[in-house]
Image (spheres, rainbow, N blue to C red):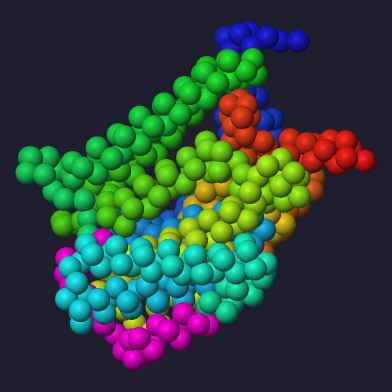
Amino acid sequence: MTSTTETENRGFRFSDIRTMFGGGQSVTRQFGILGALIVIILLFQVLTLVFRGAGLTLSSGNLINVVNQYSYILILAIGMVMVIIMGHIDLSVGSVAAFTGIIVAKSMADWNLPWPLAILLGLGVGVLVGAWQGFWVAYVGVPAFIVTLAGMLFFRGANQWIGDSQTVAVPREFVYIGAGYLPEIAVPLPFNVPTMILALLGVAWIVFNELRLRRIQNKMGAAKAPLWVSVLKMLLLAAVILWAGWMFATGREGTSFPVSGIILLVLVIMYSFLTNSTVFGRHIYAVGGNRQAARLSGVKDRWVDFFVMLNMSVLASIAGMIYVARATASGPQDGNGWELDAIASVFIGGAAVSGGIGTVIGSIIGGLVMAFLNNGLSLLGVDASQVSMIKGLVLLIAVGIDVWNKQQGRPSVIGFLMNRRKAIADFSGDIPTPAAADAAGKKETAARR
C-alpha cells in the first residue's frame, strides 16, 4: 500500500488530475453541475459572438447585470437548501418577500421612517412571519407544504391589500443596497480598487481553505492528493477569481462589484460555516437524513424545524428588500415565481427530494446555472414562453442526470462536497452524523428490547 507521504511526493501522473475535485471518478462526473455551468456560459459566449457580433456573456457589463438581477434568487436558494435538507418545502418565499417589501416601502414613504430603521423593520417582519410558519410546522405538525401554501396565498393578498395594488417608491438612499456598487477610491488606477481587494481576499481564502484541508487530512492520516495537484487547483481558482474581479473592476464608469453581491457573499460564507462547521448544522443534516435516529441521539428536531422555517422567511425578507431597492419601488406583482426559481436552484445544485443531502455552495451553483441560462437566452432574444420551456427541460435533465449518476455509484461534485464536509465535521468528533445517529438509535432500541 502506498503511504500518504509517498502519494504526496511522487512524480506526475495524469490520473492525479482526477483527484483535484474529488475521488477517482471521470471528469464528467467530477464536475457535475459545475461543469454544466461552465458549458452554459461558454456556449452563450460563442452564440452571442456568432449571432450578435460580440461575445456578450462574459463582458463586464453583463456579469454585473447577472449579479444585480439574480442575487435575490441566490439568497433565497441559501435558505431553501436548508429547508429541503430537512425534507420540507417552502412555497411562500416569493409572497413573504413581496409582503416585506411593501411594508418597508410604506414605512419610508408614508411613516417617514429612516431607511436603516426600515431595514430593521423588514428583518423583524421576516422573523415574525418565520416564527408563525415555523410554529405550525414544528409544534402543530402541519406539513410545511400546506403551511407555506397557505402563507403564499395569505401574504400575497396582504401585499396587495396593504399597498392597495399600487407601486410605492422608495428613497434614493435605500436604493443603494439593491443597485449600488463598491465605491471608487481617488487613486490613479484604471480599475475599481475595492473590487480588486475583494478578489485578493477571495484568493487568500482559497489558499487558506486548501491548506487547512491538507492539514486536517494529515492529522486524520487520510490519503490526499499530491502537492502539485493542490497547487494547480489553487492556481486555477485564483486565476478565475482574479479574472472575475478584473471584469467587475473595469466595467463602465460608475459601476463595480454590486452591493447586492457583497450581501450575497457574506450570507454564503455565514451559512456555509453554519451548515459545515457547527453543531446546529450537523443537526440539520442528521434530522433530514433520519429524523427518528437523530431524535434518539438527543437532537431537538422540533427546534431545528422551527429555526429552519424562521430562517427561510428572514432570508426572504432580505431578498425582498434588495429587489425593491433595485426596482426603486414595491409593486403588487413582486415575488411572483421566486419560490420556483429557488427550489429549482437547490435541486439542480444536487439536493435530494427525500432530504438529508444538499450544500449551500451547490445551491449557488445551481442558481447560477438558472441565472446564466435566463441571461443567455435573453441576450439571444428568445421569447419568454420558450425560455420557460427550456428552463423546465434543463431542470428535468440536470436532476435526472444527477440521480442517474448516484444510482450508478458516480457521485457528482455536490456529492464530493458533501463527503468532504462530513470528513471535516467527523474529525471534530462531537457532532453525530446521520449514519452515527442511525446506529445510535438502533443500539438504543435493541437495548430497550
Q: Residue at x 52, y 25 (%)?
A: 213
Residue 173 colored in magenta in the image: yes
Residue 246 spot, x, y in % from top left:
27, 43
Tell me which segment is drawn in magenta. Answer: 153-178
Furthest toward the bottom, the residue is: 164
Residue 301 horizontal side relative to residue 158, left or right = right
In the picture shown, does residue 306 fall above or below 300? Answer: below
Q: Residue at x 31, y 57 (%)?
A: 260
Q: Nearer the viewer, residue 312 or 111?
A: 111
The quarter of the rendered structure image containing the C terminus is top right
In the picture shown, does residue 203 fall above or below 341? Answer: above
Furthest toward the front, the residue is: 448
In the picture shown, does residue 21 fall above or below 14? Answer: below
Residue 173 horizontal side relative to residue 269, left or right = left
Residue 174 spot, x, y in % from top left:
21, 66
Residue 398 spot, x, y in % from top left:
64, 58
